Amino acid sequence: MGESVFIWRGYDREARLLSGKATAINKQEVIRQLQAQRIRPIHISRQRHLPEILRFSSRIRSTDITRLTRQLATLLESGIPLVQALDIVARGVRRPALKALIKDIRLSVEGGMALHRALSHHPEFDALYCQLVAAGELAGMLDAMLLRLAKHREESEDLRRTLRSALVYPTAVLVIALAVMIFLLTFVVPAFENIFASFNAELPALTLGVIALSRGWQQVGWQFLAVIAVVLYVIKKWWGSHRQFRWFVHALLLQLPIVGRLIRYACLARWSRTLATLFAAGIPLTDALDATKGVTGHLHFEAATLVLKSQLIRGQSLAHALAQHRDLFSQMLIQMCTIGEESGMLERMLEKSAAHYENEVGATVARLTTLAEPLIMLTLGLLIGGMVIALYLPIFQMGQVI
């Protein structure tokens, strides 16, 4: 049976009522832990998870954790103790799930648990976050580390928003266009078909094609959407369980003309930013690489990072190891790492590289948006405009005859 988190209350030797949390296999082990601290327990209960209604009605977002990190850093920098800082932040939070999370962390810290260990009990704080907090606690610079962590998360979220903005506009336009086409094929075209049937005249080929498309949609359209949904579901399952499939897709995406460059720049920005943050926190470079391997979300960068770690263990420099993976890591990043290692300012060079690639991502997204707009307009014109022309073309021909 694995360890669980228990909530306890008890009295110390001076008869003061204390409360906190302890990680143990059962209640008897908690009692032994408290007795070793000269605490007489009066209540011990296993911690319950947040109620389902809280977890699903008020999910904790990444931006909530970033804001919490920034607030904690500011309060600690002002000299406020950690427990009091958590209490102040909790009082200013309205979201039920986030308030419960902060109070839970506060109770653990008040019971004597280290902050990084209290955070590790919650999936909202990943291993990278907990590792940096642990380094800050060990060095006695928790406020400075939280400030660095907040800046790291804010810049990562800015990059994520930039990438998302490249997809939102074309996706929204295409979804609206698809909805309009379905509406036309389902309701408008059949109405025109009834009108054309009363003409007893030969219809243009374009109009006949649209009518055939409408009939086909009405007969098998919803089945077609169901098949698409099943295919997407199968792809999602494959994506999670077949690493080779994801490896192939990731390799294919890197080869695309503009999208591949965008993905590569985004991966390099995340990789450089995370490695700089970890290394500046005093974490050894090999351990920092181990924590950095998954931040890009790209299997090829993850595998290359593991190889880099093994090369550093064998005594190679970071720049020399990067030079052996030029298909992923750019020449500029290699040169910046060379300068950083020679000058002893590696974290600063990595931060500059991250800023450069973040700017490149923004510029590439702007170019993609500029190119996408006329292509989207052309697509809409051909699809919806062509359908409207096909419906009115017989009426125009009849007007010319009359």
Image (cartoon, rainbow, N blue to C red):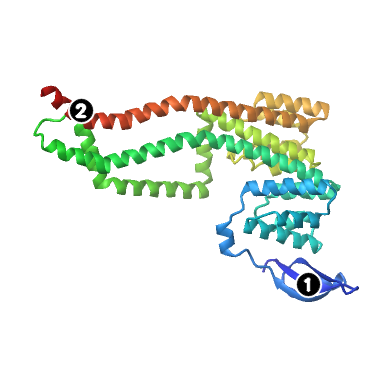
> In the structure shown, which secondary structural element does the residue marked by tag 2 occupy?
helix
**Label 1 to label 2: alpha-carbon separation:** 82 Å
Q: Residue at x 73, y 45 (%)?
A: 70
Query: In the rendering, at what x and y percent does residue 235 appear?
Result: 45, 46
| Depicted 98 relative to depicted 371: above or below | below
- Circle 1: residue type: Arg
| Depicted 13 relative to depicted 299: above or below | below
Q: Looking at the rendering, which quadrant does residue 203 occupy?
A: top left
Q: Residue at x 66, y 41 (%)?
A: 293
Q: Nearer the viewer, residue 202 or 265?
A: 202
Q: Residue at x 23, y 39 (%)?
A: 189
Residue 112 visible, this angle: yes
For label 1, the crowd category at 10 Å Cα-Cα, with few meaning under 14, some 14 to 19 and many 20 or more, is some
The quadrant the C terminus occupies is: top left
Q: Looking at the rendering, which quadrant does residue 186 occupy?
A: top left
Name the residue furthest top: 400
Say which residue label 1 marks: 9
Q: Nearer the viewer, residue 375 or 307?
A: 375
Please state if 72 lies on the left or on the right of 303 as rendered: right
